[in-house]
Amino acid sequence: MNDPDPRIDAYIAGAAPFARPILTKLRRAFHRGCPDVVETIKWGSPAFEDGGLLGGMAAFKGHVAFSLWHGMHIEDPEGLFEAVGNRGMAWIKIASTKELPPQAVLREYIGRAVQYGRDVRARPRAAAPKQGPTARRRAPPTPPALAAALAKDDAARATFESFPPSAQRDYIEWITEAKREATRAKRLATTLAWLAEGKRRNWKYERR
């Protein structure tokens, strides 16, 4: 394994017993599917990069989520993936090692995602427009935990996707800036509740 990140070692060690073998095998699959992969932590969970975000994994109370950033843009002959949000990311939920796809399948999917990402980065980019003082910035990538939660809540997702990038950014940064896992979970739950009601992050301070 190339340059393992000790934070991922600690993450796996601290996960629930059922999740540890799943996380270990997913980690191995990322390295076998992409020998040059770089480990890191994003949004409080293990992530894997190859010149850009490749995918990640996260342990929850009853399952482990395995995601590929460009999962909806690659072939899925096994019918594994569900879409997450509207950015091309896809994921599967794995509750036990029996539900874990074979290593050969995982490596194949990861390899496809690697190739897709490299092809996208190799395409010529259009000249970026000049940024003025009122230029709108794009929202940062949606954290997997938020994207997964939105995928299960139609009302919250509809509101979030209707927001301009600045309003999406307010929620994303509020969640990701939390230092403790418990705080992130609480903010995520509040985000879903407010979005379901059609509210922006700073709705309390908006003029009525």
Image (cartoon, rainbow, N blue to C red):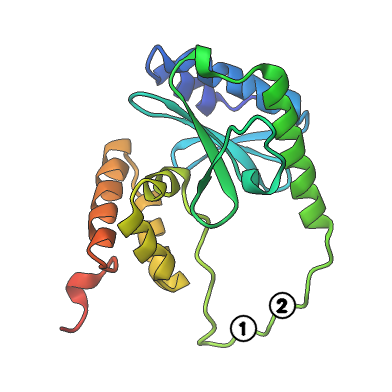
Question: Going 32% across and 44% down the picture, which residue do you hit?
Answer: 184
Q: Nearer the viewer, residue 200 or 108?
A: 108
Quadrant for the C terminus in the image: bottom left
> In the figure, 17 relative to 57: above or below?
above
Camera-side mark, 1 or 2: 2
Task: In the rendered structure, find residue 66 and report the number of the disc placed on it.
Answer: none
Q: Where is residue 103 in the image (x, y as percent from the top left)?
A: 68, 18
Q: Is residue 3 visible?
A: no
Q: Tell me the residue that label 2 is attached to.
A: 128
Q: Circles 1 and 2: CB distance less than 8 Å?
A: yes
**Dot 1, how many residues are within 10 Å of its Cα: few (below 14), some (14-19), or many (20+)?**
few
Residue 127 rendering spot, x and y as whole percentages: 77, 78
Label 2: few (<14), some (14–19) or many (≥20) C-alpha neighbours in 10 Å: few
Give residue 28's position: percent from left, percent from top.
65, 20
Image side of residue 130 versus residue 60, left or right? right
Q: Name the residue under label 1.
A: 131
Q: Of the residues shown, which amino acid type is indicated by label 2?
A: Ala
Q: Residue at 34% of width from left, 47% of height from top?
A: 178
Q: What residue type is labelled 1?
A: Gln
How far apart marks 1 and 2 lie (CA) works out to 8 Å
Q: Which corner quadrant holds the N terminus?
A: top right
